[in-house]
Amino acid sequence: MKLSPSLLSADFGILRAEARQVEPLAEYFHIDVMDGHFVPNLTIGPPVVNSLRQGLTKPFDIHLMIDYPIQYAPQFEVTQHDMITFHIEAKDEPFRAIDEIRELGCKVGISLRPITPITAVFPYLDLVDLVLVMSVEPGFGGQAFMPAAVERIEKLKNEIGDRNVIISVDGGINVKNVHDVVAAGADLIVAGSAIFKHPDRIAVMRALITAAQ
């Protein structure tokens, strides 16, 4: 199991410093981009994300909670190690969104809301590098984990089979529930408030890794 700290829960006033604190145990930095339409919240956009990269070495997973990922994805400066994840519920056609993001030279992820049937992503499993299963309703940090996500993860894991597709899970994950999430098939855990609400972030991340075993 790998960790992707969600910078949505970090102090935006010292965002790079917050990222540096968790970088030693981070597989990715999970960065939520919200447009105020797809979800009712606004966060940060390409200028902030691109400038944040200075002084950091771990790749970004840029989670686009926006209506038009094709329009905005090219504005992010990405490498082959980065991921841009869009929502299947966005207004852009998913196959086209996958192609357009892949053309940028990075990896492609697809996500879905808790109310969307997990089978909705099955037609795209041969084309993406990651499926992000939301275990809360997207748009706000600090929400409680939805236990129904465990069964959804198991179903997705069975469908993926031997495909090289990462299962990432985001929302309300902590030391009490991370074991069940990983046992169901999750490879990458997105954690925000569980990490950043504590002063010793590395200790919390180690505790999550231990609890997942």
Image (cartoon, grey):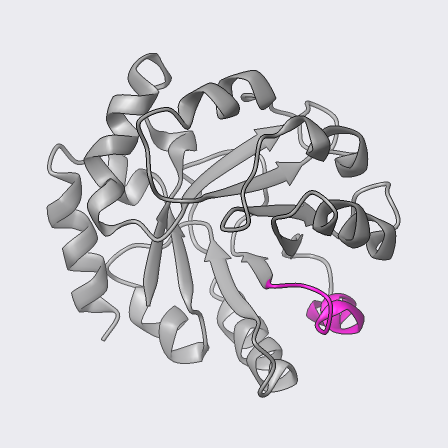
Q: Which quarter of the figure has residue 209? A: bottom left
Q: Is residue 119 magenta?
A: yes
Please state, as top left, top right, bottom left or bottom right, where the C terminus lies in the image: bottom left
The spot of residue 113 in percent (x, y) is: 66, 52
Question: Can you say whether 31 is above or below 28 in the image?
Answer: above
Question: Can you say whether 158 is above or below 78 in the image?
Answer: below
Observer able to see residue 115: yes
The spot of residue 105 in percent (x, y) is: 65, 47
- Nearer-the-camera pick, 104 or 4: 104
The spot of residue 202 in percent (x, y) is: 15, 45
Q: Which quarter of the figure has residue 211? A: bottom left
Residue 115 vs residue 82: left or right?
Answer: right
The span shown in magenta is: 118-129
Q: Give the residue at the far top of this rendering.
A: 13
- Nearer-the-camera pick, 101 or 31: 101
Taking the spot 41% from the left edge, 28% from the top edge, the residue there is 53
Taking the spot 76% from the left edge, 68% from the top edge, the residue there is 124
The spot of residue 85 in percent (x, y) is: 62, 48
Task: Tally the numbered discs.
Answer: 0
Please state, as top left, top right, bottom left or bottom right, where the N terminus lies in the image: bottom left
Residue 100 vs residue 22: left or right?
Answer: right
Q: Is residue 124 magenta?
A: yes
Residue 196 vs residue 103: left or right?
Answer: left
